[in-house]
Amino acid sequence: MRAPPMTIATHRLSELDVLESEAIHVIREVVAEFERPVLLFSGGKDSVVVLHLAAKAFWPGTIPFSLLHVDTGHNFPEVLEFRDRTVAAHGVRLVVAQVQDYIDDGRLAERADGTRNPLQTMPLLDAIAAGRHDAVFGGARRDEDKARAKERILSLRDEFGQWDPRNQRPELWNLYNGRHTVGQHVRAFPISNWTELNVWRYIERENIELPPLYYAHEREVYRRDNMWRAISPVSPPRDDETVETRTVRYRTVGDMSCTGAVDSHAASVADVVREVGVSTITERGATRADDRISEAAMEDRKKEGYF
Amino acid sequence: MTLTIDTQASTENDIVAAPEGTLFRFATAGSVDDGKSTLVGRLLHDSKAILADQLEAVTRTSTERGFGGESGGIDFALLTDGLRAEREQGITIDVAYRYFATPARSFILADCPGHVQYTRNMVTGATTADAVIMLIDARKGVLEQTRRHLSVVALLRVPHVIVAVNKIDLLDYDEAAYREVEASVRLVTAELGIAEVLVIPVSALVGDNVVDRSERTPWYAGPSLLELLETLTVIDDLDERGQATEAFRLPVQLVLRPQGAVVVAPELADSYRDYRAYAGQVASGSIRVGDPVSVEPGGGTSTVTGIDFAGVALEEAFAPQSVALRLADDLDIARGAVIAAAGTLPPITRTLTADLFWLDPRPLAPGARVLLKFGTTVVQALISAVTGRLDLSTLAVEPATALAVNDIGQASIRLSRDLPVERYTQNRRSGAFLVIHPQDGATLAAGIVTAPGEPTRAGDGSGAGSEVSP
């Protein structure tokens, strides 16, 4: 079974091996240096990969932190089902903060455009405070967005969760500085250096299960903002929008009210790897209405405490 | 609940078989008008790393701002300037990371802005880089800024230094003019002790020698910039004899001791009841099962009985793998300890001299109490004296008693406890440290050990050296 060893190897680790080791190093550093880390877990592919990496980091032990999901109330039901099943399989605790609770009691108001992504920040900060979390893992990647391209792997936030891009700590060698004062917390992004293609290749290599809507399936959709939008109670078509059944898949999985699907026949992970490898549009550009609001949409949300 | 992690198919095969792609990290640096953004944009564009929607966005913004005049054109700087303030002011504030791949390799590019806080940005980009590309305007030649950047690169011992002599089109591809610039570059790098520097004539605007070799520079026989990036060795590569170039070091991050709370199959749970392993990322070198090791603090010795990676037993571990080591003996090992190949530990000391890259707006005065982070250990320290400061225009060390932001200086440091301290020139990972503010936690400086002080105890290596004997 083993391939014949190379005569003189000058490098022995593949790109994925290097990225995996870097991510595990970050996860272990944060667990070692912080009192109460938590992982933001939505059931989306990036957070699923971080959870998988955490399981590898502490093998044969269990993952030594809990998970947190800010549920917008507009999530795909099959993703929530997957989320709960995955959490149970890993034997970890999940806390769910509900945006709906905040809307019900008036702390947040529904936006005119119906999208709830920007509404996640307040419940997130409250949940971080309630859990007394001093470190928050996220699956954000630098290749997703120009603002994220400038964020550190360990990113210090003040008590309002704010990111100050002009005053970031320099990050040197692989020496992460997690020092913080009372009220501050740190966002930790172990897969900062991964691209969308890296994530998919890793999912393929490690045989990681994802919610089914990442793969091609038939769905009733309509066209809006150059994206295929799913029919759901929170995203009904307008009168002038035509509903049709198409074979689509999701490149990102988020709030139903602002996440779009793409035409795709990629039914397996190998198909998706091939598709992503030749894609000519970024995943957020293809699927996220909220990031199209302005060139700095992500930066503005992050400054307010978004992840 | 039992969790199965499917690793059998992955790790071992990937290591035994030739990896399908390697990762190469490089940083770009240069002065404001040297055309760095254009070069980065050109690399990304010509290697087809800019996707349609990104290109459309920057083309639209370029046109709105009248970039390129009547004929139009793309302001590639818009691709990397990600922050609102940067786009509004037309400046680059912080290091931006970009990702692209060619069939040969994948790249992480740290784009370091040249004018504001150049030391901070250069140091950040260069500490993890396999290569640095220094940009020079062919018409201007070596400027003071070039010397400054190159001195940072030299002190940090970046493995590969590439100098791209840009805007060669504006010199009408004149060989004599290029040779003159090249000679002055080599004069400076020789002075700085940079062993090898690769100089390339390029035009980022036109594309000469960036991705493809240019017919307009027939007098240049070397590779294009991208060809170089695709073939240079990476930091953790082995030498031509297949040996790691530095001795094995594993800073212990934490001890894995699940005490029954395990994820292995129930029938195996019993055999993991007393499981104990030391988790960390191999900082340098390699180790095999059966190899003798030394541990500091404590000075204990033992033998590696197992190397675990998430359920896969490895025969060997090497940098930069994250693994867990099992040892034959029950030593007192906690976070902050270093596991090293036996016979390679440097002497133990409480004093050292270092070069400091001062990154904080608050100046350093002698007597400052700080924290140092070496690997996974944090130790209290006292900066007992500032002994010099690098004059970046003459590259000479001048006397100094304090350091200001962006200064590179020399200092004597006292540690609150014994540490195995080794020179940065001997080990790029264990000879590097952070200087941290003890109250607010700010990263004040990057430090590299120039010399360990008087030993309080001998290491187990031969003298001050820790190099692998051939």
Image (cartoon, rainbow, N blue to C red):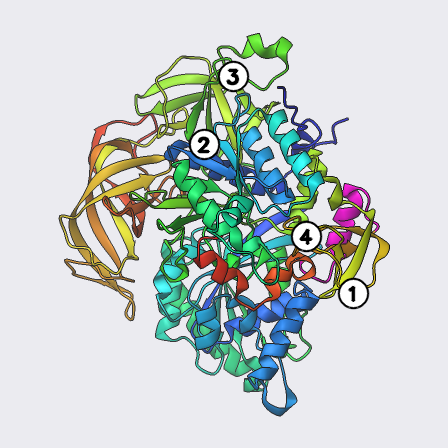
| Kind of element beneath mark 2 | loop
Residue linked to disc 3: B261
Q: Which span is picked out in magenta?
A: A265-282
Q: How many marks?
A: 4
**Residue B28 magenta-highlighted:** no
Circle 1 or circle 3, nearest the eye: 1
Q: Nearer the viewer, residue A54 or A216?
A: A216
The alpha-carbon separation of the residues under discs 3 and 4 comes to 42 Å
| Discs 3/4, front | 4
For residue A234, which numbered disc appears in the image?
4
Image point (60%, 23%), residue name: B311
Q: Residues within 10 Å of mark 3 (few under 14, many from 20)?
A: some
- Closest to the observer, B266 or B233: B266
Most distant residue in the bottom direction: B70
Residue A172 visible somewhere in the drawing: no
Tag 3 and tag 2, C-beta contact below 8 Å: no
Q: In the depicted view, which residue is nearer to us: B359 or B12?
A: B359
Residue topped by disc 2: B248
Q: Closer to the camera, B356 or A177?
A: A177
Query: Mark 2 packing: few (<14 Cα in 10 Å), some, or many (20+)?
Result: many
Q: Position of residue B58 (x, y in %)?
A: 61, 74
Q: Residue extending furthest front?
A: A105
| Mark 4 vs mark 2, CA separation in Å | 57 Å
